[in-house]
Image (cartoon, rainbow, N blue to C red):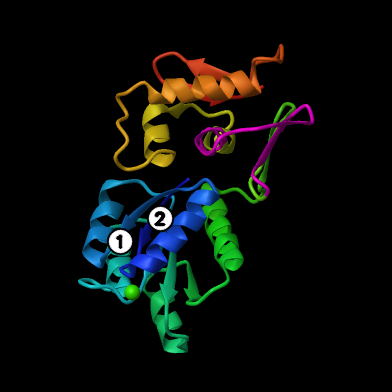
Amino acid sequence: MRILLVEDEKKIASFIKRGLTEQHYTVDVAGDGDEGLYLAQINPYDLMVLDIMLPGRDGFAVCRELRQQNNEMPILMLTARDDVQDKVYGLDSGADDYLTKPFAFDEFLARVRVLLRRNQGQKSTLHKVADLELDQISRTVTRAGTPIDLTATEYALLEYLMIHAGQVVTRTMISEHVWHQDFDSFSNVINVYVNYVRKKVDAEYPKKLIHSVRGRGYMVKE
Ligand code: CA
């Protein structure tokens, strides 16, 4: 899952980015409202975390502009002020949720998960394909009950495939939702990582679950 964080205070931005990255999310950071708006227009993010007080366009203006352009990406607003008017104005600008700084990071992560699930139309955080299970809360993967140890990138890739189980996931989708902005989708990095994941998930089992779809991409299915 790929998240755009728009936050001008460098310390807070790096704190949030580090916390999200530890949870295996891919994070791009914009330091002001105009850059945030630009990045949101050119990349298909799964979620935006948007500070209100920003140089250039503020968070309200960024949010309104995106909604006017029919961009329906979930937006979680952050503010330093615990002010009811701000919350009302933020939600009326088109934000999906609202959190006051300073916040407990666990609560922040829970709200991020809710918005991502809602966006994917999924209610469950547990994904099952045959005997392969992925738990988005504990970030654990098991096959036939045996834990599988994945790196951050391998997990992010498998999570994306599992959320879209039964659907073709193209290389473009993977490069846009699993990797960073500067990722080169023409390199063979995706193939390399799919092979790493296959080795861990499929190699020892007769029934293969990660399939290549010729000329299109990959699919996880029974
Ligand atoms: Ca700020």
Figure check: 128 above or below 197: below
Q: With 100 as the anchor, is 64 left or right in this view?
A: left
Give the SS element for disc 2.
loop
Q: Residues within 10 Å of mark 2 (few under 14, many from 20)?
A: some
Q: Quadrant of residue 178?
A: top left
Rendering coords of residue 187 (x, y %):
32, 23
Is residue 140 inside the magenta stretch? yes
Question: Which residue does the numbered mark 2 point to in the structure image?
Answer: 73
Q: Is residue 50 visible in the rendered structure shown here?
A: no
Rendering coords of residue 52 (x, y %):
35, 74
Q: Amino acid at mark 2?
A: Met
Ligand 1 visible in quadrant: bottom left
Rendering coords of residue 9 (x, y %):
33, 70
Of all residues, the one furthest to the front in this rendering is 11
Q: Amino acid at mark 1?
A: Leu
Q: Nearer the viewer, residue 29 or 94?
A: 29
Q: CA distance from mark 1 to mark 2?
A: 9 Å
Q: Give the residues drawn in magenta, as a range.
A: 138-158
Q: Nearer the viewer, residue 151 or 205?
A: 151
Mark 1 C-beta to ligand 1 under 8 Å: no
Q: With 171 as the anchor, is 1 left or right in this view?
A: right
Rendering coords of residue 184 (x, y %):
29, 31
Identified at 45% across, 81% down, the residue is 87
Give the SS element for disc 1.
helix
Q: Is residue 44 visible in the rendered structure shown here?
A: yes
Counting residues from the start of the chain, the first of labels 1 and 2 encountered is 1
Identified at 35% across, 46% down, the residue is 44
Identified at 55% across, 18% down, the residue is 211
Figure check: 121 above or below 64: above
Question: Which residue does the numbered mark 1 point to in the structure image?
Answer: 66
Disc 1 vs disc 2: Cβ atoms closer than 8 Å?
yes
**In which quadrant of the rendered image does the C terminus lie?**
top right
